[in-house]
């Protein structure tokens, strides 16, 4: 798979990282996947996906501060890069274009 294509889980996680902003860390992403997309994935799948997205240059991470509620452990906070925004826009445009070419399924304007 080339660097400018993303899978469905990668796309969902990218969208959630944008949505969650400063709260975009592993467990929050996993919870949002379940709530927003009805996808029940393991934390390992989330970590594997964010590692892959980071290696592709679509996201970056920084370590947040340690908290008492996490036993002094720090959160790894994710944010989207310009390349990540571009790949999301490309993915959206491809899908919208395809939907518009199928009249019986086309997206109705509100």
Image (spheres, rainbow, N blue to C red):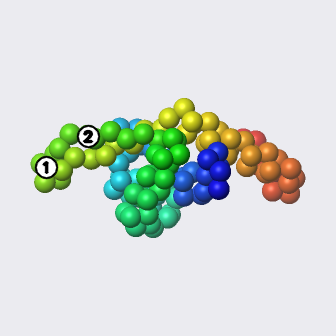
Q: Residues within 10 Å of mark 1 (few under 14, many from 20)?
A: few
The kind of secondary structure element at disc 1 is loop
The quarter of the picture where the N terminus appears is bottom right
Left or right: 61 as drawn, with respect to 91: left
In what quadrant of the picture does the C terminus appear? top right
Q: Earlier in the sequence, mark 2 or mark 1?
A: 2
The total of numbered circles placed on residues is: 2
Q: Secondary structure at mark 2?
A: strand
Q: Position of residue 21 (x, y in %)?
A: 40, 38
Q: Which residue is mark 1?
A: 72
Give coordinates of residue 65: x percent, y percent: 20, 39
Q: Residue at x 50, y 63 (%)?
A: 38
Q: Nearer the viewer, residue 102 or 43?
A: 43
Residue 19 appears left or right of 85: left
C-alpha separation, residue under disc 2 versus residue under disc 1: 11 Å
Residue 29 rendering spot, x and y as whole percentages: 40, 53
- Looking at the image, which residue is at 53% across and 45% down? 56
- 29 displayed left or right of 65: right
Tag of residue 64: 2
Q: Is residue 40 visible?
A: yes
Say whether residue 19 is visible.
Answer: no
Label 2 crowd bin: few (<14), some (14–19), many (20+), radius 10 Å: some
Residue at the spot 68% in from the left edge and 41% down from the top edge: 90
């Amino acid at each position: 798979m080339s660097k400018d294509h993303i899978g469905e889980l990668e796309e969902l996680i990218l969208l959630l990282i944008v949505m969650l902003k400063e709260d975009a860390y592993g467990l929050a992403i996993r919870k949002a996947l379940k709530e927003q997309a009805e996808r029940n994935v393991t934390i390992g799948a989330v970590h594997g996906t964010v590692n892959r997205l980071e290696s592709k240059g679509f996201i970056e991470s920084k370590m947040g501060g340690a908290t008492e509620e996490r036993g002094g452990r720090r959160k790894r906070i994710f944010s989207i890069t310009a390349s990540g925004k571009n790949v999301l826009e490309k993915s959206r445009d491809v899908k919208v274009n395809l939907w518009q070419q199928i009249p019986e399924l086309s997206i109705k304007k509100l």
